[in-house]
Amino acid sequence: MKISKICCIGAGYVGGPTMAVIAQKCPHIQVTVVDLNEARIAAWNDSDLSKLPVYEPGLADVVAEARGRNLFFSTEVDKAIDEAEMIFISVNTPTKTYGIGKGMAADLKYIELCARQIARVARDNKIVVEKSTLPVRTASAIKSILDHTGNGVQFQILSNPEFLAEGTAIDDLFAPDRVLIGGEDSAEGQKAVNALADVYANWVPKDKILTTNVWSSELSKLTANAFLAQRVSSINSISELCEKTGANVNEVGKAIGLDSRIGPKFLKASVGFGGSCFQKDILNLVYIAKSYGLNEVADYWEQVIIMNDHQKRRFAKNIITTLYNTVSGKKITFLGWAFKKDTNDTRESAAIYVADYLLNEQANIAVFDPKVEEQQILTDLDYLDTRSSEENKSGVDVTADPYQACKDSHAVAVLTEWDEFKTYDWQKIYDNMLKPAFVFDGRNILNKEELQKIGFIYKAIGS
Ligand code: NAD
Ligand code: UGA
């Protein structure tokens, strides 16, 4: 079976870039990305490519090449479902904020709405692809909805989780470590698996396309994120021990990473991991384990989150104790708000939590981030519901110029590892700060010797 028309429901950080790359690499396939969010679709269609709703290096070029040729962004969800042979579901699956499983389980209401919409609209056989990250066995719920339409339409459900990381999404999509496709064992199931594998085979080497059963595929996604986050929490736990013992976490990370069984990646100590998925997916894993009565399994993974929360709190506490046990009325400058460099995404960013702790201590926070707007920063703080919007607004000052942001500050805190922070004129920053001038490097990216020579009191993570 050859696919000629694809629809993707959800034009977010995954749906947008993923479909743009499929369209670019497969000019013979028409790809339509649909979303209920009209503003988001309008931004994807904006002729000014700097206005795309997702900032990713290289994305604008891919969109420029394919958009209008075989890549389309639209709000006409029904039409796109009706026309496509293959439908990707790439909607958000946030942590539930209500009812049973509140704060732990994945909220699958958007997934179910998609399934019901596909069931209502489809008039011929479709392959439905889970692109969103989902609890293991979700495909059976989707199948149950799709199989009860009574109109004779046949559906195959595949799991095809996405492993791209933000900030490197385009490189990751161009050259994935692997593409994972889970499908039913039946002849029809395998036909669907092959149809999707053929799409990827347009640019991904065949030996990197891995096929499994549906449940392994669904669970592998949660497991991959849990393992990655666990590495960050592991090295962050060691960073605290380094600070007590005179060891240096950068040196420890390098020393253990040279062991080929451990490997060098994901061993950077930090203020704590953020992003829309690590926490959500681990909480989901913990919830699933508990729901099967596997309490030891649940506790084991929950510790990754506990350590991450501790690391964020510890960073904020260190600022307070170092500034003579009070930050009340003091200006603290945040360099960076995004959860990592090269993205405008702030979801679950450590910066939000550190700011929240410091605002509780009545600090005045100035923020500079090269890609994050003021409105987003205030929305992130309001979402925590710790204090009123007015109070957040009066405690936080977002500035478009980093030097202005650092002027008259007591301390600068690096929350995101943006490359440009390394090349700032730190002498100029120092000259305009209150003394003693402190730097808290939550990403270990600045040059300690250079800053100390200028006169800064420099505090890194894990040394
Ligand atoms: P997102 O919030 O950026 O985008 C989801 C989009 O789906 C939104 O624009 C929303 O309006 C739309 N949507 C929701 N319900 C809809 C409906 N019924 N019809 C049409 N549109 C609808 O989310 P995201 O970051 O792209 O993540 C999507 C999924 O991919 C999640 O399950 C996430 O865990 C997973 N994932 C994310 C990343 C990442 O880097 N962000 C990486 C891998 C996997
Ligand atoms: C992560 C995974 O890397 C992707 O494979 C996955 O597809 C994605 O989650 C998802 O499912 O959403 P992402 O969150 O975009 O990608 O970015 P990462 O590079 O994994 O970074 C996550 C967080 O960990 C960031 O806050 C980053 O700064 C932090 N981190 C990462 C560290 O603190 N230290 C490290 O060594 C690595």
Image: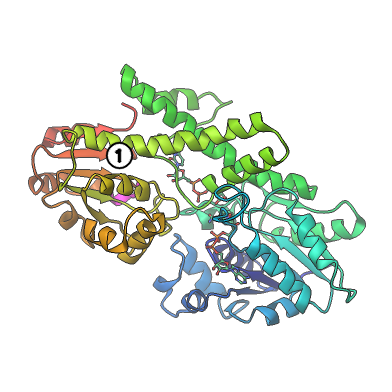
Q: Residue at x 58, y 61 (%)?
A: 92
Q: Is residue 31 left or right of residue 341?
A: right
Q: Position of residue 88 (x, y in %)?
A: 69, 65
Residue 168 falls inside the magenta stretch: no
Quadrant of res 140: bottom right
Judging depth in this view, the residue of 8 and 253 nearest the camera is 8
Q: Residue at x 70, y 33 (%)?
A: 294
> What residue did someone put label 1 on?
316
Q: Position of residue 435 (x, y in %)?
A: 8, 39
Vertical placement of residue 44 versus 264, above or below: below
Q: Quadrant of the N terminus?
A: bottom right
Q: Is residue 375 left or right of residue 145?
A: left
Can residue 167 be seen?
yes
Circle 1: residue type: Ala
Vertical placement of residue 113 versus 340, above or below: below
SS category of the residue bearing label 1 = helix
Vertical placement of residue 269 versus 114, above or below: above
Judging depth in this view, the residue of 415 and 197 nearest the camera is 415
Q: Position of residue 239 (x, y in %)?
A: 38, 27
Residue at the outermost top position: 245
Vertical placement of residue 334 versus 376, above or below: above
In terms of image quarters, where does ligand 1 lie?
bottom right
The span picked out in magenta is 416-421
Q: Quadrant of the C terminus?
A: top left
Q: Residue at x 65, y 69 (%)?
A: 8
Can residue 208 be seen?
no
Q: Position of residue 338 (x, y in %)?
A: 38, 54
Query: Dot 1, crowdedness within 10 Å: few (<14), some or many (≥20)?
Result: many
Judging depth in this view, the residue of 110 and 66 nearest the camera is 110
Instruction: Count the marks.
Output: 1
Q: Is residue 207 left or right of residue 60?
A: right
